[in-house]
Image (spheres, grey):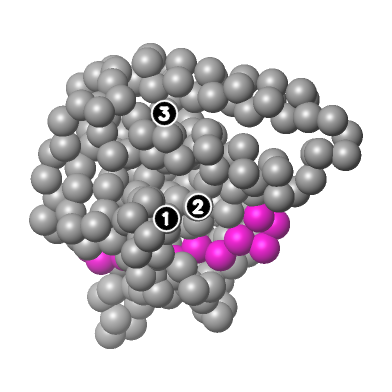
Amino acid sequence: MTELHLADETEAADLAAFLSRLLHYDRGAAVRLQAAGTALAVFGRPPSFEVLAVRAVRLAKPYEDGLDVTLDMTVSAGELLESVDERAATAAVPGAVTGPPWAGVLPPRAGWRPEPGLPAPDALRATVAAVVAEFRSRTEELAPGERTRAELDRIGRDIWSRRIGDTRLPVRAVHAAQSLGFLRPGTGPGDIGLFSSGAWLRLRTPYGSVAVRRSGLGDFGLSVR
């Protein structure tokens, strides 16, 4: 089994926290790993948000496994989490699993251009708090017979598909960033950015990124490789 040597205990702890959050939303979550040199990218898709979450992890030394110098495989998030040793700053790569459909379409690695209009982090967190409160209020106002899955989904689509400020970024992407620990308190305006590449939008923070892709219906959905 291939062992990854992470840069330090903090990198190992952050990786474990990211995997734990993914498993909170999907106990059977899978993640796609891509490593080259001293960089490891971990891709996941929390189903509640319909976005692609990306956590970059620094490695202590270039990845190597025999004659292979790159890693690209889909594995169980739970098995990977179990292998993380925070004190030793290591993680063992578990066996590959059959990847879910989202694992077949990843956003491009290059060609990202800055997008204007992204509010400051405090404003983004305030927006998330407001829409969460709105969703709770609107669902609580429903009569018991009206509180169906279809009606809850309709309210959710109305709220989470709204755009952030003057950008094309849907609110659900910011909610995902906060829920996954990417939009932490203390994050300043210079620490985050919004970028586009083709049909993709990417919200980047020092702790991870959230990407969404324009669907054929004209709204933002996610197709992830």
Position of 126 with respect to 146 (left or right) is left
Question: How far is disc 1 from disc 2 in space, using C-alphas?
Answer: 7 Å
Residue range corresponding to the magenta coloring: 26-39
The answer to if 153 sits in the magenta stretch is: no
Indicate the amino acid at tag 1: Gly
Label 3 secondary element: loop
* Between discs 1 and 3, the one toward the N terminus: 3
Position of 47 with respect to 161 (left or right) is right
User: Which residue is located at x 41 percent, y 28 percent?
Assistant: 183
The answer to if 31 sits in the magenta stretch is: yes
* CB-based contact (under 8 Å), mark 1 and mark 2: yes
User: Which residue is located at x 18 percent, y 54 percent?
Assistant: 197
Which of the 4 image quadrants contains residue 114?
top left
- Rendered position, 14 above or below 133: below
Please give the label number shown on residue 183: 3
* Between discs 3 and 2, the one toward the N terminus: 2
Indicate the amino acid at tag 3: Leu
Mark 2 highlights which residue? 50
